[in-house]
Amino acid sequence: MKKFATVLTAIVMLFATSSFAMDGDNVTAKVKAAFETDFSKAKQVNWEKISDFYFASFQLNDVSIDAAYNEEGELVGTSRKIASAQIPLSVSLELAKKYFEYTISEHAYELNFEGQTSYYITAENSKQALSLKCYSNGDIEVTSKTKK
């Protein structure tokens, strides 16, 4: 069950819509205080609440970042969009070896969750598109396949 909650939280962080947007006044004091401690220089902060989680989308050093907090004010995870060139070398080498017949997307999503960093990237060829979850050590798993 914990693994399911982990995956669900990660997906929600990446693909949450702004239909639940809220201003900072509706965020609990614990969550707001934790966010201000963790990201004191954040700008343009927008909040969303989905289930038992608060999601902050903000700018930090001209980078768009999303952060998830539980109701106790604990940082659950963060995500940001990065250039594919920024993924770790171990991941780049493994992508080049396993997916040499595919075009790798120019951008990836970096997700930090429970102390682990993973990267979500798309690889396409003429027959299919693959959504890949890549781990810092170079391990890669296919999370979905779409035929063209």
Image: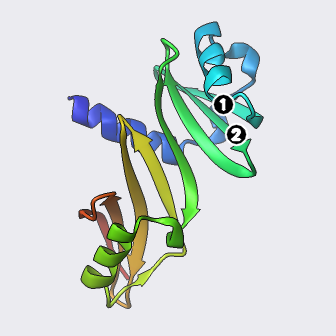
Residue named by callout 1: 39
Q: Which of the 4 quarters of the picture holds residue 34?
A: top right
Q: Estimate how packed mark 1 is, as few (under 14), some (14 to 19) or many (20 or more) residues with alpha carbons within 10 Å.
A: some
Task: From the top left corner, tell me how far across and down residue 68 is, in percent.
Answer: 52, 31
**Amino acid at dot 2:** Phe
Residue that lies at the very extreme toward the front in this rendered image? 89
Q: How crowded is mark 2: few (under 14 residues within 10 Å), some or many (20 or more)?
A: some
* Residue 94 x, y percent position in the rendering: 28, 75
Front of the two marks 2 and 1: 1
> Going from the N terminus, do you reach mark 2 or mark 1 first?
1
The residue located at (45%, 48%) in the rendering is 111
Helix, strand, or loop for circle 1? Answer: loop
How many numbered marks appear? 2
**Which corner quadrant holds the C terminus?**
bottom left
Q: Is residue 22 above or below residue 137?
A: above
Relative depth, front residue between 148 and 2: 2
Q: Mark 2 points at which residue?
A: 58
At 48% from the left edge and 11% from the top edge, which residue is drawn?
72
x, y (%) of residue 90? Answer: 32, 68
